[in-house]
Amino acid sequence: MLNNLLDGKKLFSFYIPVLIAAVYLVLAVVSVQHDDITFDESAHLLYGIQIIKGNPDRSFNEERFRSTMPVSALNALPRAVEQLLQPGTKKNDWGKDDIKSGRYITILLTLVLLLYCFRFSASLTSAKVGCVIMSFIAFDPNVLAHSRLVTTDIYAAIGFIATIYHLWKWLATKESRHFYFWCIAIAVAQCCKPNNVLLYPISLIPVIFYSVKNRSILILKEIVTRILVFALIQIVIINGCFLFSGPWGLSLVQLHFRSDFFTSLQASWVAKIPIPFSKAYIDSFDLVQYERETFDGTALNYLAGELRYKKGFWNYYLICYALKTPLISILLTVAGIIYSLVIRKIRILSLIFCCWPCVFVFVFLSNSSIQNGYRYLIPVTCLSLIFTSWLLEAALKKISKILLLYFSFIPLLTAIMAFPNYIAYSNMLVADKKMAYRFLADSNFNWGQRRSAMQFFLIEHPDYIFEPSVPVTGMIIVDLNNLTGIKTPEKFRWLRENYVPVATIDDCYLIYNVKQLPAKN
Protein backbone atom coordinates (compact mmCIF):
# COMPACT_ATOMS: atom_id res chain seq x y z
CA MET A 1 0.00 0.00 0.00
CA LEU A 2 2.80 2.37 0.88
CA ASN A 3 4.54 1.61 -2.43
CA ASN A 4 1.31 2.45 -4.29
CA LEU A 5 1.14 5.75 -2.45
CA LEU A 6 4.77 6.50 -3.33
CA ASP A 7 3.96 6.07 -7.02
CA GLY A 8 1.56 9.01 -7.01
CA LYS A 9 2.55 11.70 -9.54
CA LYS A 10 2.06 14.64 -7.20
CA LEU A 11 3.51 12.99 -4.14
CA PHE A 12 7.15 13.86 -4.83
CA SER A 13 6.50 16.92 -7.00
CA PHE A 14 4.16 18.65 -4.56
CA TYR A 15 3.01 16.97 -1.34
CA ILE A 16 6.37 15.90 0.09
CA PRO A 17 8.08 19.24 -0.74
CA VAL A 18 5.18 21.03 0.98
CA LEU A 19 5.52 18.69 3.96
CA ILE A 20 9.27 19.36 4.18
CA ALA A 21 8.64 23.10 3.99
CA ALA A 22 6.00 22.88 6.71
CA VAL A 23 8.25 20.92 9.06
CA TYR A 24 11.07 23.40 8.39
CA LEU A 25 8.75 26.28 9.29
CA VAL A 26 7.76 24.61 12.56
CA LEU A 27 11.39 23.98 13.54
CA ALA A 28 12.48 27.49 12.56
CA VAL A 29 9.62 29.35 14.24
CA VAL A 30 9.70 27.32 17.47
CA SER A 31 13.50 27.30 17.84
CA VAL A 32 13.96 31.02 17.19
CA GLN A 33 11.94 31.79 20.30
CA HIS A 34 14.94 30.57 22.32
CA ASP A 35 17.49 32.87 20.62
CA ASP A 36 18.53 36.25 21.97
CA ILE A 37 19.46 38.99 19.51
CA THR A 38 22.78 38.08 17.91
CA PHE A 39 25.69 40.46 17.46
CA ASP A 40 25.05 41.55 13.85
CA GLU A 41 21.26 41.66 13.67
CA SER A 42 20.77 45.21 14.92
CA ALA A 43 23.12 46.64 12.28
CA HIS A 44 21.33 44.82 9.46
CA LEU A 45 17.92 45.96 10.70
CA LEU A 46 19.05 49.58 11.12
CA TYR A 47 20.38 49.65 7.56
CA GLY A 48 17.16 48.06 6.32
CA ILE A 49 15.18 50.81 8.06
CA GLN A 50 17.51 53.39 6.55
CA ILE A 51 16.84 51.95 3.07
CA ILE A 52 13.07 52.15 3.60
CA LYS A 53 13.50 55.78 4.65
CA GLY A 54 15.21 56.40 1.31
CA ASN A 55 18.84 56.67 2.38
CA PRO A 56 21.20 53.86 1.26
CA ASP A 57 24.39 55.71 2.22
CA ARG A 58 26.68 54.31 4.88
CA SER A 59 28.02 56.49 7.64
CA PHE A 60 31.80 56.28 7.79
CA ASN A 61 31.45 56.53 11.57
CA GLU A 62 29.25 53.44 11.78
CA GLU A 63 31.51 50.38 11.52
CA ARG A 64 28.56 47.98 11.71
CA PHE A 65 27.21 49.23 8.37
CA ARG A 66 30.25 48.11 6.38
CA SER A 67 28.79 44.90 4.96
CA THR A 68 25.06 45.60 5.29
CA MET A 69 23.07 45.46 2.05
CA PRO A 70 19.70 46.71 0.71
CA VAL A 71 18.06 43.28 1.01
CA SER A 72 17.80 43.94 4.76
CA ALA A 73 14.94 46.30 3.96
CA LEU A 74 12.81 43.14 3.74
CA ASN A 75 13.44 42.46 7.42
CA ALA A 76 12.46 46.03 8.25
CA LEU A 77 9.05 45.65 6.58
CA PRO A 78 7.20 44.56 9.76
CA ARG A 79 8.44 47.71 11.49
CA ALA A 80 7.47 49.85 8.49
CA VAL A 81 3.96 48.35 8.37
CA GLU A 82 3.57 48.89 12.11
CA GLN A 83 4.62 52.51 11.69
CA LEU A 84 2.05 53.00 8.93
CA LEU A 85 -0.74 51.48 10.99
CA GLN A 86 0.29 53.25 14.19
CA PRO A 87 2.09 56.49 13.22
CA GLY A 88 4.44 57.88 15.84
CA THR A 89 5.03 54.53 17.52
CA LYS A 90 8.14 54.65 19.69
CA LYS A 91 9.90 51.78 21.43
CA ASN A 92 12.51 51.69 24.14
CA ASP A 93 13.73 48.13 23.71
CA TRP A 94 16.75 48.97 21.50
CA GLY A 95 15.05 47.39 18.50
CA LYS A 96 14.64 43.90 19.99
CA ASP A 97 10.95 43.62 19.11
CA ASP A 98 11.57 44.81 15.54
CA ILE A 99 14.42 42.32 15.10
CA LYS A 100 12.30 39.45 16.38
CA SER A 101 9.51 40.42 13.96
CA GLY A 102 11.98 40.80 11.10
CA ARG A 103 13.28 37.28 11.66
CA TYR A 104 10.05 35.82 10.29
CA ILE A 105 10.77 37.44 6.92
CA THR A 106 14.05 35.52 6.68
CA ILE A 107 12.27 32.33 7.71
CA LEU A 108 9.65 32.75 4.98
CA LEU A 109 12.16 33.67 2.29
CA THR A 110 14.25 30.62 3.13
CA LEU A 111 11.43 28.72 1.42
CA VAL A 112 12.68 30.32 -1.82
CA LEU A 113 16.09 28.75 -1.21
CA LEU A 114 14.49 25.37 -0.54
CA LEU A 115 12.37 25.66 -3.68
CA TYR A 116 15.40 26.46 -5.81
CA CYS A 117 17.32 23.53 -4.33
CA PHE A 118 14.37 21.20 -5.02
CA ARG A 119 13.89 22.44 -8.59
CA PHE A 120 17.62 22.31 -9.34
CA SER A 121 17.95 18.72 -8.13
CA ALA A 122 14.67 17.63 -9.73
CA SER A 123 15.74 19.16 -13.05
CA LEU A 124 19.04 17.29 -12.92
CA THR A 125 17.38 13.96 -12.07
CA SER A 126 13.87 13.49 -10.67
CA ALA A 127 11.40 14.91 -8.17
CA LYS A 128 12.05 11.97 -5.82
CA VAL A 129 15.71 12.89 -5.56
CA GLY A 130 14.76 16.55 -5.35
CA CYS A 131 12.80 15.80 -2.18
CA VAL A 132 15.81 14.11 -0.58
CA ILE A 133 18.08 17.05 -1.41
CA MET A 134 15.48 19.51 -0.15
CA SER A 135 15.27 17.54 3.09
CA PHE A 136 19.04 17.54 3.58
CA ILE A 137 19.17 21.32 3.13
CA ALA A 138 15.99 22.25 5.00
CA PHE A 139 17.01 20.30 8.11
CA ASP A 140 20.70 21.17 8.07
CA PRO A 141 21.28 22.79 11.50
CA ASN A 142 23.46 25.45 9.88
CA VAL A 143 20.75 26.45 7.43
CA LEU A 144 18.22 26.43 10.26
CA ALA A 145 20.58 28.53 12.38
CA HIS A 146 20.93 31.39 9.91
CA SER A 147 17.54 31.19 8.26
CA ARG A 148 15.99 32.62 11.44
CA LEU A 149 18.14 35.74 11.79
CA VAL A 150 18.06 39.32 10.53
CA THR A 151 21.27 38.89 8.57
CA THR A 152 22.08 38.47 4.88
CA ASP A 153 23.61 34.98 4.86
CA ILE A 154 20.49 33.15 3.66
CA TYR A 155 19.68 35.87 1.13
CA ALA A 156 23.22 35.49 -0.20
CA ALA A 157 22.67 31.74 -0.54
CA ILE A 158 19.40 32.30 -2.43
CA GLY A 159 21.15 34.64 -4.87
CA PHE A 160 24.05 32.24 -5.29
CA ILE A 161 21.96 29.12 -5.97
CA ALA A 162 19.49 31.00 -8.20
CA THR A 163 22.37 32.36 -10.29
CA ILE A 164 23.99 28.95 -10.81
CA TYR A 165 20.62 27.30 -11.50
CA HIS A 166 19.55 29.76 -14.21
CA LEU A 167 23.06 29.82 -15.69
CA TRP A 168 22.92 26.03 -16.03
CA LYS A 169 19.40 26.07 -17.48
CA TRP A 170 20.47 28.64 -20.05
CA LEU A 171 23.81 27.14 -21.12
CA ALA A 172 23.33 23.39 -20.71
CA THR A 173 19.68 23.10 -21.74
CA LYS A 174 19.63 26.09 -24.14
CA GLU A 175 16.48 27.57 -22.62
CA SER A 176 17.05 31.21 -23.60
CA ARG A 177 14.52 32.68 -21.11
CA HIS A 178 16.88 31.56 -18.37
CA PHE A 179 19.46 33.99 -19.75
CA TYR A 180 17.27 36.83 -18.51
CA PHE A 181 16.55 35.03 -15.24
CA TRP A 182 20.30 34.57 -14.76
CA CYS A 183 20.95 38.26 -15.41
CA ILE A 184 18.30 39.20 -12.84
CA ALA A 185 19.48 36.62 -10.27
CA ILE A 186 23.12 37.66 -10.39
CA ALA A 187 22.16 41.35 -10.11
CA VAL A 188 19.89 40.74 -7.13
CA ALA A 189 22.63 38.61 -5.53
CA GLN A 190 24.91 41.65 -5.52
CA CYS A 191 22.44 43.42 -3.23
CA CYS A 192 22.45 40.54 -0.74
CA LYS A 193 26.13 40.24 0.24
CA PRO A 194 29.38 41.78 -1.05
CA ASN A 195 30.93 38.31 -1.47
CA ASN A 196 28.43 37.55 -4.22
CA VAL A 197 30.55 39.66 -6.55
CA LEU A 198 32.40 36.33 -6.97
CA LEU A 199 29.46 35.16 -9.07
CA TYR A 200 30.75 37.23 -11.98
CA PRO A 201 34.06 35.36 -12.43
CA ILE A 202 32.31 32.11 -11.44
CA SER A 203 29.77 32.61 -14.25
CA LEU A 204 32.39 33.66 -16.78
CA ILE A 205 34.02 30.23 -17.08
CA PRO A 206 30.80 28.32 -17.97
CA VAL A 207 29.79 31.08 -20.41
CA ILE A 208 33.14 30.92 -22.22
CA PHE A 209 33.16 27.11 -22.21
CA TYR A 210 29.69 26.74 -23.73
CA SER A 211 30.26 29.60 -26.17
CA VAL A 212 33.33 27.85 -27.55
CA LYS A 213 31.62 24.45 -27.45
CA ASN A 214 28.57 25.68 -29.38
CA ARG A 215 30.65 28.03 -31.55
CA SER A 216 28.34 30.88 -30.60
CA ILE A 217 31.48 32.86 -29.82
CA LEU A 218 31.73 33.39 -33.57
CA ILE A 219 28.34 35.15 -33.73
CA LEU A 220 29.50 38.67 -32.92
CA LYS A 221 26.05 40.29 -33.07
CA GLU A 222 24.60 37.83 -30.55
CA ILE A 223 27.54 38.32 -28.18
CA VAL A 224 27.28 42.10 -28.26
CA THR A 225 23.52 42.00 -27.75
CA ARG A 226 23.75 39.69 -24.75
CA ILE A 227 26.56 41.73 -23.17
CA LEU A 228 24.52 44.92 -23.52
CA VAL A 229 21.39 43.30 -22.10
CA PHE A 230 23.38 41.79 -19.24
CA ALA A 231 25.04 45.12 -18.42
CA LEU A 232 21.76 47.02 -18.59
CA ILE A 233 20.02 44.62 -16.21
CA GLN A 234 22.93 44.85 -13.75
CA ILE A 235 22.88 48.65 -13.81
CA VAL A 236 19.11 48.96 -13.41
CA ILE A 237 18.66 46.35 -10.65
CA ILE A 238 21.72 47.19 -8.55
CA ASN A 239 21.12 50.93 -8.74
CA GLY A 240 17.43 50.32 -8.13
CA CYS A 241 18.17 48.40 -4.93
CA PHE A 242 20.34 51.28 -3.83
CA LEU A 243 17.41 53.61 -4.68
CA PHE A 244 19.23 55.24 -7.60
CA SER A 245 20.94 57.36 -5.00
CA GLY A 246 23.52 59.80 -6.21
CA PRO A 247 26.04 60.55 -7.07
CA TRP A 248 26.45 57.74 -9.60
CA GLY A 249 28.36 57.50 -12.84
CA LEU A 250 31.45 58.94 -11.16
CA SER A 251 34.99 57.69 -11.75
CA LEU A 252 37.24 56.37 -9.01
CA VAL A 253 39.18 59.64 -9.05
CA GLN A 254 36.07 61.54 -7.97
CA LEU A 255 35.29 59.27 -5.01
CA HIS A 256 36.61 59.22 -1.45
CA PHE A 257 37.91 55.87 -0.24
CA ARG A 258 39.08 54.56 3.11
CA SER A 259 40.85 51.37 2.03
CA ASP A 260 44.42 51.41 0.72
CA PHE A 261 43.43 49.09 -2.13
CA PHE A 262 40.85 51.44 -3.64
CA THR A 263 42.95 54.50 -2.87
CA SER A 264 45.83 52.95 -4.83
CA LEU A 265 43.49 52.30 -7.76
CA GLN A 266 42.92 56.05 -8.04
CA ALA A 267 46.43 56.38 -9.45
CA SER A 268 45.79 53.87 -12.26
CA TRP A 269 44.31 54.43 -15.72
CA VAL A 270 41.06 52.68 -14.77
CA ALA A 271 40.37 55.44 -12.24
CA LYS A 272 39.23 57.75 -15.03
CA ILE A 273 36.52 55.41 -16.33
CA PRO A 274 32.98 56.39 -15.19
CA ILE A 275 31.33 53.70 -13.08
CA PRO A 276 27.59 53.34 -13.78
CA PHE A 277 26.74 52.46 -10.18
CA SER A 278 25.63 54.28 -7.08
CA LYS A 279 28.31 55.55 -4.70
CA ALA A 280 26.60 53.58 -1.91
CA TYR A 281 27.17 50.34 -3.85
CA ILE A 282 30.85 51.13 -4.47
CA ASP A 283 31.25 52.02 -0.80
CA SER A 284 30.24 48.45 0.04
CA PHE A 285 33.48 47.09 -1.36
CA ASP A 286 35.64 49.93 -0.08
CA LEU A 287 34.41 49.54 3.51
CA VAL A 288 34.69 45.74 3.46
CA GLN A 289 38.22 46.03 2.10
CA TYR A 290 39.02 48.67 4.74
CA GLU A 291 37.90 46.25 7.42
CA ARG A 292 40.12 43.51 5.97
CA GLU A 293 43.12 45.83 5.90
CA THR A 294 42.74 47.41 9.33
CA PHE A 295 40.91 44.76 11.37
CA ASP A 296 39.08 47.72 12.87
CA GLY A 297 36.29 46.36 15.11
CA THR A 298 37.02 42.80 13.97
CA ALA A 299 37.78 39.76 16.08
CA LEU A 300 41.03 37.87 15.61
CA ASN A 301 40.97 34.80 13.43
CA TYR A 302 40.93 31.67 15.57
CA LEU A 303 41.53 28.05 14.68
CA ALA A 304 42.55 25.10 16.87
CA GLY A 305 43.96 27.25 19.67
CA GLU A 306 45.86 29.66 17.41
CA LEU A 307 45.03 33.36 17.03
CA ARG A 308 46.02 35.40 13.97
CA TYR A 309 45.88 39.12 13.26
CA LYS A 310 45.27 40.29 9.68
CA LYS A 311 45.97 36.79 8.43
CA GLY A 312 43.67 33.85 7.84
CA PHE A 313 44.18 30.09 7.92
CA TRP A 314 44.34 28.19 4.64
CA ASN A 315 42.35 25.31 6.19
CA TYR A 316 39.90 27.35 8.30
CA TYR A 317 36.83 26.71 6.18
CA LEU A 318 37.77 23.09 5.53
CA ILE A 319 37.75 22.49 9.29
CA CYS A 320 34.52 24.48 9.64
CA TYR A 321 32.96 22.26 7.02
CA ALA A 322 34.33 19.07 8.57
CA LEU A 323 33.14 19.85 12.12
CA LYS A 324 29.85 21.66 11.55
CA THR A 325 28.32 19.91 8.55
CA PRO A 326 26.24 16.83 9.48
CA LEU A 327 28.36 13.73 8.81
CA ILE A 328 25.69 12.17 6.61
CA SER A 329 25.79 15.27 4.39
CA ILE A 330 29.59 15.17 4.19
CA LEU A 331 29.58 11.49 3.19
CA LEU A 332 26.83 12.03 0.64
CA THR A 333 28.60 15.07 -0.84
CA VAL A 334 31.98 13.37 -1.18
CA ALA A 335 30.45 10.22 -2.69
CA GLY A 336 28.20 12.26 -4.98
CA ILE A 337 30.98 14.45 -6.34
CA ILE A 338 33.26 11.45 -6.94
CA TYR A 339 30.42 9.65 -8.73
CA SER A 340 29.64 12.64 -10.95
CA LEU A 341 33.30 12.98 -11.94
CA VAL A 342 33.62 9.28 -12.74
CA ILE A 343 30.54 9.13 -14.98
CA ARG A 344 31.63 10.66 -18.28
CA LYS A 345 28.28 12.03 -19.47
CA ILE A 346 27.82 14.21 -16.37
CA ARG A 347 31.46 15.02 -15.65
CA ILE A 348 31.51 18.37 -17.46
CA LEU A 349 28.31 19.56 -15.79
CA SER A 350 29.69 18.68 -12.37
CA LEU A 351 33.04 20.37 -13.05
CA ILE A 352 31.58 23.54 -14.54
CA PHE A 353 28.55 24.13 -12.34
CA CYS A 354 29.60 22.57 -9.02
CA CYS A 355 33.31 21.95 -8.55
CA TRP A 356 34.43 25.22 -10.11
CA PRO A 357 32.09 27.48 -8.08
CA CYS A 358 32.73 25.60 -4.81
CA VAL A 359 36.51 25.52 -5.18
CA PHE A 360 36.62 29.18 -6.23
CA VAL A 361 34.64 30.25 -3.16
CA PHE A 362 36.72 28.05 -0.87
CA VAL A 363 39.99 29.48 -2.22
CA PHE A 364 38.74 33.06 -1.94
CA LEU A 365 37.50 32.63 1.63
CA SER A 366 40.64 30.76 2.68
CA ASN A 367 42.82 33.62 1.47
CA SER A 368 40.80 36.32 3.19
CA SER A 369 42.38 38.18 6.09
CA ILE A 370 39.06 37.92 7.95
CA GLN A 371 37.42 34.53 8.53
CA ASN A 372 34.02 34.86 10.18
CA GLY A 373 32.52 31.41 10.37
CA TYR A 374 30.64 28.61 8.68
CA ARG A 375 27.80 30.88 7.55
CA TYR A 376 29.86 31.89 4.51
CA LEU A 377 29.83 28.25 3.39
CA ILE A 378 26.05 27.87 3.21
CA PRO A 379 25.90 28.49 -0.58
CA VAL A 380 28.68 25.94 -1.12
CA THR A 381 27.06 23.25 1.04
CA CYS A 382 23.73 23.72 -0.75
CA LEU A 383 25.26 23.57 -4.23
CA SER A 384 27.46 20.56 -3.48
CA LEU A 385 24.48 18.63 -2.08
CA ILE A 386 22.44 19.41 -5.19
CA PHE A 387 25.12 17.83 -7.35
CA THR A 388 24.86 14.55 -5.47
CA SER A 389 21.52 14.06 -7.21
CA TRP A 390 22.96 11.74 -9.86
CA LEU A 391 24.33 9.38 -7.22
CA LEU A 392 20.96 9.28 -5.45
CA GLU A 393 19.19 8.68 -8.76
CA ALA A 394 21.48 5.75 -9.49
CA ALA A 395 20.93 4.39 -5.97
CA LEU A 396 17.16 4.71 -6.41
CA LYS A 397 17.30 2.10 -9.16
CA LYS A 398 18.75 -0.41 -6.68
CA ILE A 399 16.76 0.39 -3.54
CA SER A 400 13.05 0.69 -2.82
CA LYS A 401 11.25 4.02 -2.63
CA ILE A 402 10.47 3.27 1.02
CA LEU A 403 14.19 3.14 1.87
CA LEU A 404 14.68 6.40 0.01
CA LEU A 405 11.91 7.94 2.09
CA TYR A 406 13.53 6.72 5.31
CA PHE A 407 16.89 8.06 4.14
CA SER A 408 15.43 11.51 3.57
CA PHE A 409 14.31 11.65 7.22
CA ILE A 410 17.85 11.23 8.61
CA PRO A 411 18.52 15.01 8.39
CA LEU A 412 15.29 15.63 10.31
CA LEU A 413 16.58 13.50 13.16
CA THR A 414 19.77 15.59 13.17
CA ALA A 415 17.71 18.79 13.33
CA ILE A 416 15.59 17.46 16.18
CA MET A 417 18.66 16.38 18.16
CA ALA A 418 20.30 19.81 17.67
CA PHE A 419 17.09 21.71 18.57
CA PRO A 420 16.88 24.56 19.54
CA ASN A 421 20.44 25.95 19.61
CA TYR A 422 21.30 25.52 15.95
CA ILE A 423 24.04 28.17 15.86
CA ALA A 424 26.18 26.16 18.28
CA TYR A 425 25.75 22.91 16.31
CA SER A 426 28.76 20.67 15.71
CA ASN A 427 28.66 17.16 14.30
CA MET A 428 29.64 13.86 15.93
CA LEU A 429 33.34 14.43 15.25
CA VAL A 430 33.18 16.85 18.18
CA ALA A 431 32.23 14.21 20.73
CA ASP A 432 32.74 16.40 23.80
CA LYS A 433 30.83 19.63 23.11
CA LYS A 434 32.44 21.50 25.98
CA MET A 435 35.78 21.07 24.20
CA ALA A 436 34.56 22.43 20.86
CA TYR A 437 36.30 25.75 21.60
CA ARG A 438 39.62 24.02 20.99
CA PHE A 439 38.75 23.97 17.28
CA LEU A 440 36.52 26.96 16.46
CA ALA A 441 34.93 30.04 18.01
CA ASP A 442 33.05 33.21 17.00
CA SER A 443 29.77 32.81 15.07
CA ASN A 444 30.48 29.10 14.68
CA PHE A 445 29.25 28.54 18.23
CA ASN A 446 28.41 31.70 20.17
CA TRP A 447 26.95 34.70 18.38
CA GLY A 448 25.29 36.11 21.48
CA GLN A 449 22.21 33.89 21.14
CA ARG A 450 22.31 32.51 24.70
CA ARG A 451 22.95 35.53 26.92
CA SER A 452 19.60 35.12 28.69
CA ALA A 453 20.28 31.45 29.43
CA MET A 454 23.59 32.41 31.02
CA GLN A 455 21.95 35.15 33.09
CA PHE A 456 19.23 32.81 34.35
CA PHE A 457 21.92 30.30 35.27
CA LEU A 458 23.72 32.95 37.32
CA ILE A 459 20.50 33.82 39.13
CA GLU A 460 20.05 30.17 40.06
CA HIS A 461 23.74 29.81 40.99
CA PRO A 462 24.73 33.08 42.70
CA ASP A 463 27.99 31.57 43.97
CA TYR A 464 29.32 31.19 40.40
CA ILE A 465 31.69 33.91 39.13
CA PHE A 466 31.15 35.33 35.67
CA GLU A 467 34.36 36.29 33.84
CA PRO A 468 36.48 37.52 36.76
CA SER A 469 38.87 40.36 35.95
CA VAL A 470 41.74 38.59 37.72
CA PRO A 471 42.55 34.90 38.36
CA VAL A 472 40.42 33.50 41.18
CA THR A 473 39.35 30.15 42.56
CA GLY A 474 35.80 28.84 42.50
CA MET A 475 33.18 28.01 39.89
CA ILE A 476 33.85 30.30 36.93
CA ILE A 477 31.72 31.00 33.85
CA VAL A 478 33.28 32.47 30.73
CA ASP A 479 32.04 33.24 27.23
CA LEU A 480 33.53 30.75 24.77
CA ASN A 481 34.74 33.59 22.54
CA ASN A 482 36.33 35.49 25.41
CA LEU A 483 38.07 32.35 26.59
CA THR A 484 39.71 31.80 23.18
CA GLY A 485 40.84 35.43 23.17
CA ILE A 486 39.48 36.56 19.81
CA LYS A 487 38.87 40.03 21.28
CA THR A 488 41.29 40.22 24.23
CA PRO A 489 43.91 37.47 23.85
CA GLU A 490 45.55 37.85 27.26
CA LYS A 491 42.51 38.22 29.52
CA PHE A 492 41.77 34.52 30.02
CA ARG A 493 45.07 33.00 28.97
CA TRP A 494 45.56 31.80 32.55
CA LEU A 495 42.28 29.90 32.35
CA ARG A 496 42.54 28.30 28.93
CA GLU A 497 46.17 27.21 29.36
CA ASN A 498 45.80 25.66 32.80
CA TYR A 499 42.28 24.28 33.14
CA VAL A 500 39.66 22.24 31.35
CA PRO A 501 35.95 23.16 31.43
CA VAL A 502 33.69 20.85 33.41
CA ALA A 503 30.41 21.84 31.73
CA THR A 504 28.79 24.27 29.30
CA ILE A 505 25.73 26.47 29.20
CA ASP A 506 24.12 25.69 25.84
CA ASP A 507 27.60 25.15 24.31
CA CYS A 508 28.16 28.91 24.39
CA TYR A 509 29.53 29.50 27.89
CA LEU A 510 32.07 27.31 29.63
CA ILE A 511 32.09 26.41 33.31
CA TYR A 512 35.38 25.86 35.15
CA ASN A 513 36.01 24.51 38.63
CA VAL A 514 39.23 26.28 39.66
CA LYS A 515 40.38 24.82 42.96
CA GLN A 516 43.91 26.20 42.90
CA LEU A 517 45.49 29.05 40.98
CA PRO A 518 48.34 28.23 38.61
CA ALA A 519 51.85 28.78 39.88
CA LYS A 520 53.45 31.99 38.67
CA ASN A 521 56.44 31.61 36.38
Image (cartoon, rainbow, N blue to C red):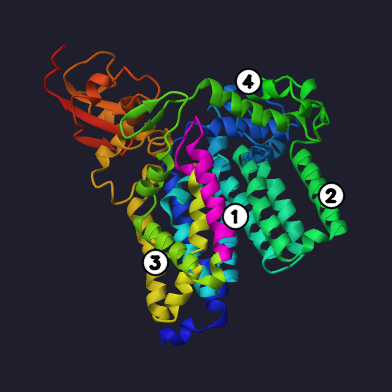
Spatial CA distance of label 2 from label 3 is: 46 Å
Horizontally, is 272 left or right of 440 in the view? right
Residue at x 41% of width, y 88% of height? 1
Q: Which mark is residue 161?
A: 1
Mark in the foreground, 1 or 2? 2
- Could you say which quadrant of the image residue 512 lies in? top left
Spatial CA distance of label 4 from label 3 is: 50 Å
Is 10 or 462 nearer to us in this picture? 10
| Residue labelled with disc 3 | 409
Q: Secondary structure at mark 3?
A: loop
Magenta run includes residue 355: yes
Horizontally, is 249 left or right of 449 in the view? right
Q: Secondary structure at mark 4?
A: helix
Range shown magenta: 348-375
Magenta run includes residue 250: no
Disc with the residue nearer the chain's start (3 vs 1): 1
Spatial CA distance of label 1 from label 4 is: 32 Å
- Could you say which quadrant of the image residue 207 lies in? bottom right
Mark in the foreground, 1 or 4? 4
- Whether label 3 touches label 1, CB < 8 Å: no
Q: Is residue 432 above or below residue 203?
A: above
Amino acid at circle 3: Phe
Residue at x 41% of width, y 60% of height? 334
Disc with the residue nearer the chain's start (4 vs 3): 4
| Residue labelled with disc 4 | 260
Q: Which mark is residue 228?
A: 2
Q: Label 4: few (<14), some or many (≥20) within 10 Å?
A: few
